[in-house]
Image (cartoon, grey):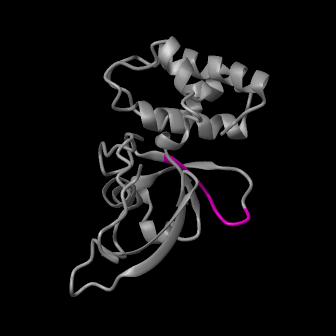
Amino acid sequence: MPRRASSSSVGSSSTQTSVPITVKVNGAQYTHSVEPRLLLVHYIRNVLGLTGTHVGCDSSHCGACTVLIRGPGESLWRAVKSCTMLAAQADGMEILTIEGLAKNGELHPLQNAFWENHGLQCGFCTPGMIMAALGLLIRNPAPTREEIKWGISGNLCRCTGYINIIKSIEQAAREMKEKSTTV
């Protein structure tokens, strides 16, 4: 369960103006006042306590911080690297993190496919990789192998060599199509 900030102003100093934001994360609504320069990844991890979204490089190169966002009026989720977005920019948006995928104790088809196909080793990149893959599958439910490679090209894995990650995404695409599911 995400934790709520103990004060009304999070990450602010006495000389910094705070910005009010309201976001819906994994189906729950949150309102906080945050420092204008607070990155979305730090808001998710440090304010909400959702530590499945990882900080890998702080420069948008690794993709470990990938989450899905959907703005007001948008029907499709899109993958973003949360280290490239300010929390204030997410005001009014819905955010989906790795913690929001499993439903009723059952893994999402992508999570299950990564498990079954050994699509992870150390696991550090896995949450971001799964969220990037889900962003791809939402927009392209039946990607080719080349489209999968392109879809996860912004996410680095230093352990697996990507073969089992790609197999995992291919399996999940088939299962998601059979079950008519996305998120």
Q: 3 and 46: which one is in front?
A: 3
Specify start and end residues of the magenta stretch as a single range. 67-73
Question: Across the whole image, how many numbered discs are drawn on residues?
Answer: 0
Q: Is residue 63 above or below residue 83?
A: above
Q: Position of residue 125 (x, y in %)?
A: 38, 32
Q: Position of residue 52 (x, y in %)?
A: 38, 41
Taking the spot 53% from the left edge, 26% from the top edge, the residue there is 111
Taking the spot 73% from the left edge, 65% from the top edge, the residue there is 73
Residue 90 lies left or right of residue 47; in this view the side is: right
Residue 103 lies left or right of residue 13; in this view the side is: right
Q: Which image quarter: residue 127?
A: top left
Taking the spot 55% from the left edge, 34% from the top edge, the residue there is 102
Q: Position of residue 131 (x, y in %)?
A: 53, 38
Q: Position of residue 28 (x, y in %)?
A: 54, 58
- 158 part of magenta stretch: no
Q: Is residue 177 above or below residue 36?
A: above
Indicate the quadrant containing the C terminus: top left, top right, bottom left or bottom right. Answer: top right
Q: Which image quarter: residue 61?
A: top left
Residue 27 lies left or right of residue 175; in this view the side is: left
Q: Which image quarter: residue 64?
A: top left
Q: Is residue 24 above or below residue 125?
A: below
Q: 169 and 162: which one is in front?
A: 169
